[in-house]
Image: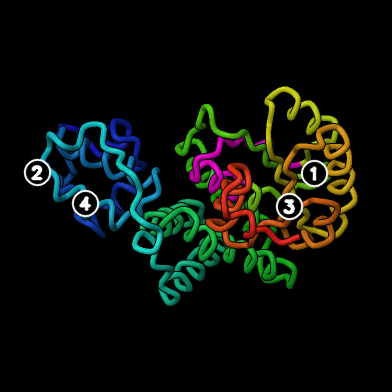
Amino acid sequence: MYTIGEAAVRSGVSVPLLRAWERRYGVVSPQRTPAGYRLYDDEAIARLRAVRALVESGWAARQAATHVMGLALGALAGLAGPAPDRTTRDAGPDRVATADLVRRFVDAARRVDHAEAARVLDEAYATTSFEVASQAVALPALVAIGEAWSRGELDVAAEHVASAAVLRRMGAAFDAAGRTPGAPVVLVGMPAGSQHEIAALAVATASRRAGLDTIYLGPNVPTDAWLAAVAETGARAVVTGAVMEDETATATEALRRLRKAHPELLLAVGGRHAGILATDGVVRLPDPLAEAASALRAALSGGPGDGAFSR
């Protein structure tokens, strides 16, 4: 039997997320010690691992839990079956529920309560796909916090707590998605001078989840570093962007030099000022994360999804 901390380590599921799956979906039913502490057996660990594998392959948590609960213990080993069709996997966010999560996250940031901010994010990502949770909760919450900061309604510490919580959660999802050897290599990052990396990390994670061999370079990537990374990795695509207007100059320079050095490279952009950058064969990604990742994959495979880009 294992404590909740040991179960988290053995299953690869964080303690807050484990509790959320237990409470919401009944994935596991732990025994209790006389003092009330949870204890988990090997079957519980196997079920947690199976749900995690399905969620990482693209299933919504609720559907993954329902599927796993219907399986015998012997069928759980190595489970990571194909994701169901997206229309059944992700019917879309509950607007009332997501609005409440956004409100709670902003309140947690205002109180500089990093533990509550993490709990809200765990709840959001436990109930739907990475793409929907990011698009409907994490990114809107950060926008709301930024606007509140600009109005002087909360301190910069609150903004930092919120950004750090989202970066940790997205970073974990990016690592969990893993690389896909043999798939087209995609480099994602922000141009020199840009520190606005959260949306780029979200795109990089969605791209990995779509089956592309995605490498995240992070914020503030000098143009020479972009060129070196393409040469080193043999990348077939570069994704960058501009959140602020003053970032467009360095982004444009990077794209120009990348195009000159690698004419065959797919160059894609996103962000608030992507329209300024989407010229001379540079394509603009759709705003929804799932669509952006799907469009990238289709374009790199030469499939029918090429039209998902706007120029």
Q: Earlier in the sequence, mark 2 or mark 3?
A: 2
Residue bearing the label numbered 1 = 191
Q: Residue furthest bottom?
A: 96
Q: Which residues are magenta?
A: 201-219
Q: Earlier in the sequence, mark 3 or mark 1?
A: 1
Q: Secondary structure at mark 2?
A: loop
Disc 1 packing (10 Å; few <14; some 14–19; many ≥20): many
Q: Secondary structure at mark 3?
A: strand
Residue bearing the label numbered 2 = 34
Q: Secondary structure at mark 4?
A: helix
Q: State the image quarter where residue 224 is shown.
A: top right
Q: Nearer the viewer, residue 232 or 45?
A: 232
Residue 228, percent across and down?
79, 26
Q: How many marks?
A: 4
Residue bearing the label numbered 3 = 269
Please state which of the two labelled residues, at mark 1 or mark 2, is closer to the viewer: 1
Residue bearing the label numbered 4 = 67
Q: CA distance from mark 1 to mark 2?
A: 56 Å
Q: Nearer the viewer, residue 134 or 111?
A: 134
Q: CA distance from mark 3 to mark 4?
A: 37 Å
Q: Which mark is residue 173?
A: none
Disc 2 packing (10 Å; few <14; some 14–19; many ≥20): few
Disc 4 packing (10 Å; few <14; some 14–19; many ≥20): few
Residue 235, percent across and down?
68, 32
Amino acid type of disc 4? His
Q: Earlier in the sequence, mark 1 or mark 2?
A: 2
Please state which of the two labelled residues, at mark 3 or mark 1, is closer to the viewer: 3
Report the side of 13 relative to 204 (left or right). left
**Residue 112: in sight, yes or no?**
no
Residue 104, percent across and down?
47, 67
